[in-house]
Amino acid sequence: MRFHNRRPRPGTEIRTVLPGSPDAVEAGGRSVRVGDDHVATLVVTSYPSEVGAGWLEPLLAYPGRLDAAIHIDPIPPAVAADRLRKQRARMESSRRVDAARGRLDDPELDAAAEDAADLATRLARGAGRLFRVGLYLTVHADTPDELAERVTEVCALAASLLLGAVPVTWRQLQGWIASLPLAVDRIGLTRTFDTEALAASFPFASPDLPVPTGDTGMGVFYGLNLASPGVVVWDRWAQDNANAVILARSGAGKSYLAKLDLLRNLYLGVEAFVIDPEDEYLPLAEAVGGTVIRPGAPGVRINPFDLPTTGEPDTLIRRALFAHTFVTVLLGGRSDAQGPPPLPDDQATALDSAVLAAYRAKGITSDPRTWRRPAPLLADVVAALEKTDPAGKALAARLAPYVTGSFSQLFDRPTTTRPQGHLVVYAIKDLPDELRGVGTLLTLDAIWHIVSATGAGPRPRRLVLVDEAWLLLRAGLGAKFLLFLAKSARKYGAGLTAVTQDAADVLSTDVGRAVVSNATTQILLRQAPQAIDAVTRAFGLAQGERAFLLSAGRGDALLACGSSRVAFHTLASETEHALVANSPAFAGAGRPDSGEGDR
């Protein structure tokens, strides 16, 4: 049987042929020739009684070209329950006949009856469903003799997995069509699977990684497994915590991977907040309709006295206490690891009275219904300070440059842009050095209030991504925030991603080591020789893993979760690559599958 793409005669109808389609298809009893390619299809007729997660992954590790097609057809619950009831009746009848004739119990029949009873219970409770599943394996080769060898090898591989695979004799054309991405199954040799068995059949799972502790259905594709032809799909939300750290030297591809992970989490409905010190995430935010807040840019204002509309009953008191931290950082400038010096006691007392008086002047009290009213500004607090004792007036004089002077552009008006939406990027590159400390403080405070907010509905998953985390870890308030978020994010359904190129400095501090140890997902890319010793000690790397990180190419990474490790190469589509590549010169030219381009 042949199907040709012939050149049409003059005057005849011309039909479009898909690019790459074969010039001929010749079907035989045991194989099909598709152009210059010889293919043979096997159908799986028997399965093991018990399977684990990713049990089909060894098929993807086959060194030859092998197409695995899984056809899934859900069975209506009513039909499934009726068939299961009849099957249980047949099993029970067989057991009674054996007992009446004095035969010994059949262990296989007893086990099948127990499994059927358990499945019937889960179906009745809606905890599972039944599916008709057909598994077809199509083997490719250049010659008929090579094809015969490949078929024998695949059958042996299937047998090692306790799978019975046989050729679809005289139905090879239908078998080849069943392996194409057409969702057409002309073979129809199926087996009934329940939900758990079908989920375990997901082939894109690495056996080198631990089985997730929960099933969230939110796995993210990271890239190609470097140890096998498989892929690496990782579900950070199903681990003990959703925190992650990405450590690499400059130019190894850490920001590329971080943005790709962020984008694919957005696909899954995760809300994300990004602290971007170098404006690297702005094209991504624009493409997905995110919100960009640029503290320090002309016209951008942040009111440090804004009250969250949802929160704890003592929110007003907490905001008054935060005012002390805000003023301390504002007057202390750029804080070091120990933080800025605190306010004198008399000025702190005057500030506390002035903040509460400013809220009362705006009609805001401890009643949550008043929290939606316009919040006071820094100028209102300074005006209240001028009405207090000499200590308050002295504090008001120190705050004057931030109200009417050269530093007032960030606080002299109400907040201009609210951090709302599925992606909020805080681009802090425009913050002057004199305001970088307080601007970062307000950014972290706004993110934390959203992450920790309580509401009536279910809490959405939220991701906080801090790029160039070493900038925050070297400052007292930034390090304190990252450590607190790393330890507390889990109970709020959130996850922290810390991306840094200064691995040695991060691992040399107690706070840095604590942030790393509180991240279940740890990703290491190429490391500098000066930092490899610290990384080896911190992560317990073997000599082969150490050598891999010293010589890894751009985009090659080692995913670590406890003692489990897997190496992969970051892979993105052309559209994703254009969004996550740093340099515009490579955004349209770099090939995502080759690791080229500015990452």
Image (cartoon, rainbow, N blue to C red):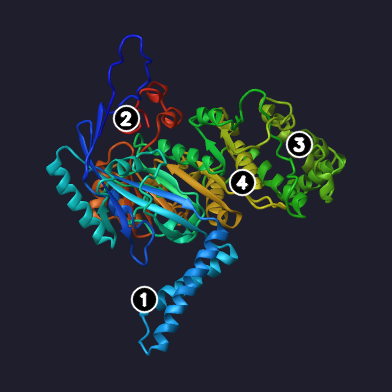
Q: For the point 28% across and 63% down, which residue is it? A: 162
Q: CA distance from mark 4 to mark 2?
A: 48 Å
- Say whether disc 4 or disc 3 marks the residue closer to the N-terminus: 4
**Residue type beneath disc 4:** Pro
Q: Mark 4, residues whose alpha carbon is within 10 Å: few (<14), some, or many (≥20)? A: few
Q: For the point 40% across and 33% down, which residue is it? A: 573
The reply to whether dot 3 and dot 2 touch (C-beta < 8 Å) is no
Looking at the figure, which quarter contains the N terminus?
top left
The reply to whether dot 2 and dot 1 touch (C-beta < 8 Å) is no
The residue at which mark 3 appears reads as: 396
Q: Secondary structure at mark 4?
A: loop
The residue at which mark 1 appears reads as: 108
Between 509 and 229, the residue placed more toward the observer is: 229
| 117 vs 580: above or below | below
Between 59 and 46, the residue placed more toward the observer is: 46
Looking at the figure, which quarter contains the C terminus?
top left
In the rendering, at what x and y percent does residue 319 appear? Answer: 73, 47
- Say whether disc 3 or disc 1 marks the residue closer to the N-terminus: 1
The reply to whether dot 4 and dot 2 touch (C-beta < 8 Å) is no
Determine the image quadrant of residue 193. bottom left
Q: For the point 68% across and 30% down, which residue is it? A: 301
Q: CA distance from mark 3 to mark 2?
A: 56 Å
**Residue type beneath disc 3:** Ala
Q: Secondary structure at mark 2?
A: loop
Marks 3, 1: nearer the viewer: 1
The residue at which mark 4 appears reads as: 341
Marks 3, 2: nearer the viewer: 2
The residue at which mark 2 appears reads as: 596
**Residue type beneath disc 1:** Glu
- Say whether disc 2 or disc 1 marks the residue closer to the N-terminus: 1
In the rendering, at what x and y percent does residue 454 appear? Answer: 69, 52
